[in-house]
Amino acid sequence: MARDRKDRGANWFVERHGDSVLRIAKITNFVSWQPAHTVLTFPKQIPDGLLDVLFPGKLKADPFLIEIESFPDVETLQQIRRDLAMVLLIRDAVPDIIVLVLMPKGDQVIEQDQIVTSAHGLTELGLKVRVINMWTVPAEELLATNDVGLIPWLPLCKYDGPPEALLQLCKERIEQQARPEEKGNLLAVTRVMAEARYNNPQLLSLLGGEIMTLEKIFMQSPTIQRLMAINSCQTTQNNVLHLLERRFGGVPEDLAAHVRAIREQDKLNNLLDLAVDCVDMEAFRNAISGP
């Protein structure tokens, strides 16, 4: 499975069906959940998911950090440590960490308990995570929950019957139980998961004749939409400042800070036009400082 396809599907799935991921990890006694709205960093570095989960008797939700890995990998723990550090820095809380590993790879494993030691041995950092190896999870166990959000994971699970029967069951459950607006997306993610294990076009066709695209799923992710909006604003800000610098020389720091403080794309587009048309730097400053 290509990593970008996995990442896109994972981000969409965790944001839309984070409760299903919690149930895979046997976390079931929560009252409510929602994707965390805090943007941690740039898109390539964000975790697959960060959930705020509220439990009975608590007034504040607890953070759950979700990582979904295609295979066991030595880099996974490095990524987990970075994600943990980001959440701790921004949220001032240590999140519960759930790692879903989709497929085995030789004898490699992700250890649940890790100790990282500093260069001179003066400091040790203990790290414990919940690792779920999907190929060890019985498919019947997920089916018994009657949670349609768990269906995309079934092709990766332990199943004694033929794969044709399992994929047909996945399709039937989604068509019968999913909301109309979710059916296509759930089938698409199910297909990606099945593709990782079987890579058989004839078998995959059981999930639908149309090859579902993950681009649509990717674009529906609220986190990705927010990050794209931020990146678009930053690009326009940079273009405004670069244009001013090319036309009039260095941009004063206070003026550059003023431009970077503007986050509305429409206003930034107007500033870009202004940077093209203004007669000098002072005219630009006066225009953006006016009412």
Image (cartoon, rainbow, N blue to C red):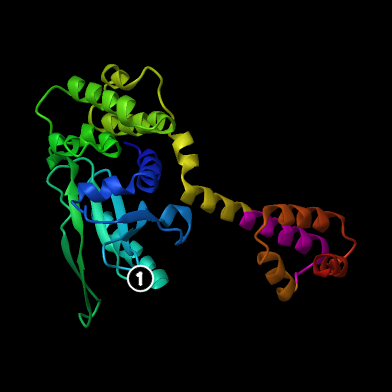
In the depicted view, which residue is nearer to us: 77 or 84?
A: 84
Q: Point out residue 128 in the picture as x, y percentages from the top left corner.
A: 19, 64
Asked whether residue 199 is in view, the answer is no
Magenta stretch: give its range. 233-251
Which of the 4 image quadrants contains residue 179? top left
Query: Does residue 17 sit above or below 183 in this rendering?
Result: below
Q: Find residue 125 and report its image quarter.
A: bottom left
In the displayed image of the protein, which residue is found farthest to the front?
A: 57
Task: Please tell me which residue is depicted at 35% across the width and 68% down the height of the picture.
Answer: 60
Q: Where, quadrant-wise, is the C terminus in this rendering?
A: bottom right
Spot occupied by residue 65 in the image (x, y as percentages of width and height): 31, 58
Residue for badge 1: 88
Label 1 SS: helix
Q: Is residue 238 found left or right of 87 in the rendered image?
A: right
Task: Residue at 39% x, 72% y: name it.
Answer: 89
Q: Is residue 142 magenta?
A: no
User: Which is nearer the eye, 61 or 244?
Assistant: 61
Question: Can I make out residue 111 in this image?
Answer: yes
Whether residue 211 is situated above or below residue 117 in the rendered picture: above
Callout 1 crowding tier (Cα within 10 Å): few <14, some 14–19, many ≥20: few
At a point 80% along the width and 53% down the height, the residue shown is 273
Horizontal arrangement in the rendering, residue 12 relative to residue 286 (left or right): left
Q: Is residue 236 magenta?
A: yes
